[in-house]
Image: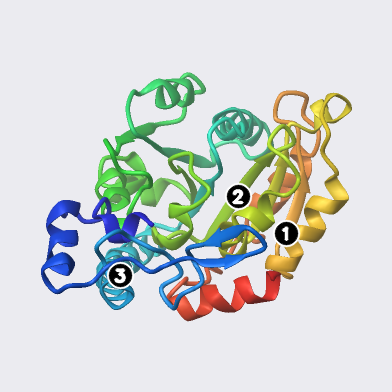
Amino acid sequence: MCVVCGCGTGADPETVHADDEEAGTSHVAPTSLNGELHYGAGVARLSVPGMSEARAIRIETDVLDENRRHANRNRAHFASHRVTALNLVSSPGSGKTTLLCASIEALKIRRPGFAVAVIEGDQQTSVDAERIRATGAPAIQVNTGRGCHLDAQMVGEAFAHLDLHTAAHHARHAGAMLFIENVGNLVCPALWDLGEAAKVVVLSVTEGDDKPLKYPDMFAAATLMIINKIDLLPYVSFDVTRCIEYARQVNPSIDVLRVSATRGDGMDDWLGWLLPPRVEPRFRTWKASSQRRTVLQRVR
């Protein structure tokens, strides 16, 4: 998990691991069952070479607590500017950027004058931010380098560069929408509160209908699952009903929309979900490993 390898804090993973090696600790031996090796069966739910479970839990707690302080600051800042922030998460290639471009164009028609901005997260390049700017919406690119997710401090600093942040903009607009497009990754972003109102997980039909069971933390943390690229259903083996059943095994309250960002299917439903008063500050803070274990035990 990225929290314990140091990517969320700038810590040197070699130094972190060396601390445990000097203490004589080692990674957790896997549980063997029916020819499978399970490295997530211990209390920390992960194994890192040279690191004890206790050390892993301490690091995760410290890093996420610091991130949560930044997230709470972001949340208060968004509220003071009447900005609804949504964190879009997915694996690479799910169609998040295409969905955002289509959403911005549709919002221009549905709600003229409604302010929309985007924070784009990638490891490198500004390709996606340039696509967003082509729609006329402001976008800030955040390149994370070796980091596999955005964190709350990055989002706060990016927000300070957007027009949504200014008092003059606040006076002109009755509310605004901030889309945060996270780095493509169905694992690490699940843990990181950015100060958003909700996480929206985008799953394309080209990925497989079993993703909610394979990556349960992400679907448990999300408020909405968008099944994207439904125009491709005739050409892939994807069972929509089974996918929704799997998602609700992990998260019984998750909302589900079926969308084709390129063809327009489901866009009215998506806009209806987006626009006030439908979106409220309802992010469920993903605080502790014990909460994750409860979800995973329910799946198993």
Closer to the chain start, of discs 1 and 2, is 2
Closer to the chain start, of discs 3 and 1, is 3
Q: Which residue is mark 1?
A: 247
Total numbered badges shown on the rendered structure: 3
Q: Which residue is mark 3?
A: 56
Query: What whole-number distance in Å separates the C-alpha atoms at marks 3 and 2?
Result: 27 Å
In the shown orientation, is residue 169 left or right of residue 107?
Answer: left
The answer to whether one can see residue 12 in this image is: no
In the shown orientation, is residue 247 left or right of residue 32?
Answer: right
Badge 1: few (under 14), some or many (20 or more) residues near its Cα, within 10 Å? Answer: many
* Residue 183 rendering spot, x and y as whole percentages: 43, 40
Look at label 2 and name its amino acid: Val
Look at label 3 and name its amino acid: Ala
Query: What whole-number distance in Å separates the C-alpha atoms at marks 3 and 1?
Result: 28 Å
* Residue 87 rendering spot, x and y as whole percentages: 49, 51
Query: What whole-number distance in Å separates the C-alpha atoms at marks 1 and 2?
Result: 11 Å
Is 47 in front, or is 110? 47
Look at label 1 and name its amino acid: Ala
Q: Residue at x 34, y 69 (%)?
A: 72
Using the image, determine if residue 101 lies above or below residue 220. Answer: above
Q: Which residue is mark 2?
A: 201
